[in-house]
Amino acid sequence: MSVVTNTTTIGAIDAPSRRNTELVLVAFAVLISVFAYANVGLALNGELPAGMLGYGLGLALLGGVAHLAVRRFAPYSDPLLLPLATLLNGLGLALIWRLDQSERFQAIKTFAPAASKQLMFSAVGVALLVVVLIALKDHRILQRYTYISMLVALFLLILPMFFPAVNGAKIWIKIPGVGTIQPGEFAKIIIAVFFAGYLMVKRDALALASRRFMGLYLPRGRDLGPILMVWAFSILILVFETDLGSSLLFFGMFVVMLYVATERTSWIVFGLLMSGAGAVGVATFEPHVQDRVTAWLDPFAGWGKEAASEQMAKSLMAFGSGGTLGTGLGQGNSDLIGFAANSDFILATVGEELGLAGMMAVLLLYGLIVERGVRTALAARDPFGKLLAIGLSGAFAIQVFVVAGGVMGLIPLTGMTMPFLAAGGSSVIANWALIGILIRISDTARRPAPAPAPSPDAEMTQVVRP
Amino acid sequence: MNKPLRRIAIFCGILVLALLIRTNYIQYVRADELNANEHNRRVQIERYAHERGNIIVDGEPVTGSVETTDSDFKYKRVWKNGPMWAPVTGYSSQAFDSSQLESIEDGILTGNSDDLFFDRTLSMFTGEKKTGGNIVTTLNGAAQKAAFEGLGDKKGAVAALDPQTGAVLALASTPSYDPSVFAGNSMKDSDARQKLLKDEDKPMLNRALRETYPPGSTFKVVTAAAALENGLYTDIDAKTDSPLPWRLPQSTNLLQNEGNIPCKDASLRVALRYSCNTVFGKMSDDLGNEKMIEQADKFGFNEEVFTPVRADASVYPKDNPPQNAMAGIGQASNRATPLQMAMVASAIANDGKLMQPYMVAQRQAPNLDVIYTHEKEQLSEPLSAENAQKVQQMMETVVQDGTGTNAQIDGVTVGGKTGTAQHGLNNSEKPYAWFISYARTDSGSPVAVAVVVEDGNANRDDISGGGLAAPIAKNVMKAVLDGK
């Protein structure tokens, strides 16, 4: 292992830390976002927006603080994760601010501008990232909290059941004076910790103790227990909270981690079969889910009759009107979609105002985050780190797919938010924490291995006495 | 654990790839279809995002655009003197679409027409603000005013043409409406439109083009033309074979004249001067249904006329002999639009040549370049020049010392024909007062007019046509002549 290789990003020894690359990229991300913000102001009012300096400085401060924290506490971490998150968050802020200016929104009584709140939440998110980097010296510490995190995750997931539904889904809890929180976003990370810890311990049992049946390795019943439990649990979330997105997310994440832990394809087949059965089963008696599916099959059929369908159709028309190059920031009409235009449907604004080109760029940014996450998993030296990294990045990928696919009509709409881009406190904060953990794992993974300790026996064995 | 990790990486890649393909599909492949979707409000927003072009009369726009703030439609149509011009322009509403010229010439007025492609491309490079093109009409402001004010609060319509070109000079319809009241997109606009639609007087009906009336005695001009053209009579001052009383064919009913007028064997000139039902009824019967239809068709009956605004088809019916005789004097199922009767008068005034009526003289690009100019076009020749002049003499007699003396203009030769059309079962409702006329100068005829007033209250034939409708026609003709 003494050979220095730089053919992968993760070098064995003496890998460059790439901190300066990260700094340049963060500066670039901030600059792009500020340009976007200026563009919106120029398009809407013909002048540079008054808050531009504040916005630019705020974003630069967030990126800068995060970078300094990474430089100090995770010097060997992946240099792309932070700039990518900063860029998406900055673009999201510009888009939210653009939608704040919409006259159609301002005509709605319940409408409140979201950009300044989003900037505040982003700051909290970055603060959480810094806390993660400082407090979590090594990600393996999280292993100790496997079962505690299971309890916390369960608690967070069950909590919204006791709060009233918002727009048909029970995924929010309302805390007076603080606002609404979507515990599912945080549960996503915590449950990944639980899965990683649990699977690391049980992987051998799950992988090896199995019977061959019809070409597949079927696990033993007692090992099948937990997966059935998770399956049932995700179905329960779906039923009681009518949250299609979260169920898909948790289940997908679990299957991915299970597959990685056991290296058994049979788990994936099981996973797909069970999630399919569950989804079909629920769809047959849950009207909320049925509405979404009908709206997905033919968005224009329900025009004027069903809100979900009309929203879907409006979203498609927003994408269509963007065309290849888009209308330009501030010059589209994506706010026609209505109340969720700055959260669930923010991607439609990207599609309309930045066009196909912008959409591909944004999707590739997400793709890059996922790819860096998977790379981190590959490079991680411990199974727990591998599992946690793949779980988090897998969850991130599934969330992006489910939301983007939903608003683009590829799959039924589920009502999750686009990470970083969409307005929403819980989402931004949780995703910054997620990035923080990935940065921590990648730092551990890329950290140069300590020099091998001198072996006292080495000399002895090499001596050949004549 | 790395092998499954790589597979998961591929799986994530596939997820992103699926999204990339999907975004290409909806934003590139399906973009046009989505943009053309009927529910896509962007189409409407774009449509009203810039000023609409104007409809121009006498070099001045009768329309305009104002900025609005009550919706996402930026510009709203307004009309100057809307009620007067509504039968010409139609309406253009943010919420209720458009009609007539506003609708037909929408491409030019919005600037979206293919004819304006180069213009649009050019202004894209010069950075000019997009505006619509203009429609220059043939209308004569003074004539339109005379027609509209002449009708006043009476129900009726006026159509005036330039016989030599077919240009529409006046097109008035009362009661009228102001299209400005529902040009916007608010509840107020909707209410105003509902009120107009519910109004029993049908203010939104374009009576000059879209309402057919029994033409009454004014149709005798057509019957006379048919008699001359078919050689039934050749000398307008020779006695005709017209018994009095005259019994309708296959019937025991006697055709009546209004009052005690000298109709027995009256010459064509005298018969038209006094408006003898017996003479013209018998004439129509002598010619037969087919020949009457043929002659009416040559004047433009039985076919829709496009000016380019559509005018309803006037009808000379296929019918049995008694009904044909009645149709020959403008009763029975004979129905004509005011425009049609103006076409009849103009064909006679133009020595037998009927010109295609039109009201769009030019289409202009937003930069005022002319992209279309109407060329005058002959529609048909309903009667020979010789016969046309004979009918002219007859009609001029009507105005000189017949039923149409109210239309006399000093120093100008005027020909005309009055009419009082009965309508309703057994003539139960108020008759329509008609007057068709033309003025003639040394250089031919510059104007032919048809006037119909729905609520003529006098019951005697011809007098009400001459009394109610003729003065309006006279003022319209005068307005045109004064402008020359």
Image (cartoon, rainbow, N blue to C red):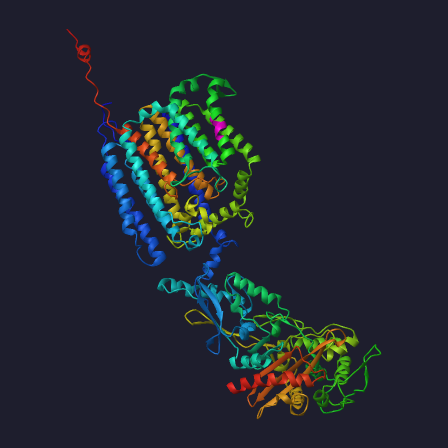
Q: Quadrant of residue B88?
A: bottom right
Q: Looking at the picture, tell me which residue is in the foreground, B129 or A50.
A: A50
Instruction: Pick the quarter of the image with the N terminus of chain A.
Output: top left
Vertical position of residue B266 compared to residue B367: above or below: below
Count the labels in the image.
Answer: 0
Q: x%, y% of residue A82?
A: 30, 38
Q: Looking at the picture, tell me which residue is in the foreground, B92 or A360.
A: B92
Residue B350 in view of the camera = no
Residue lying at 48% horizontally and 25% vertically, measured from the top left? A229
Q: x%, y% of residue B149?
A: 56, 80
Q: x%, y% of residue B46?
A: 45, 59
Residue A232 lies in the magenta stretch: yes
Main SS of the magenta part reads: helix
The stretch in magenta equals A230-234
* Residue furthest left as drawn: A466
* Residue furthest top as drawn: A466
* Residue furthest right as drawn: B252
Residue A441 in view of the camera = yes
Q: Is residue B335 left or right of residue A453?
A: right
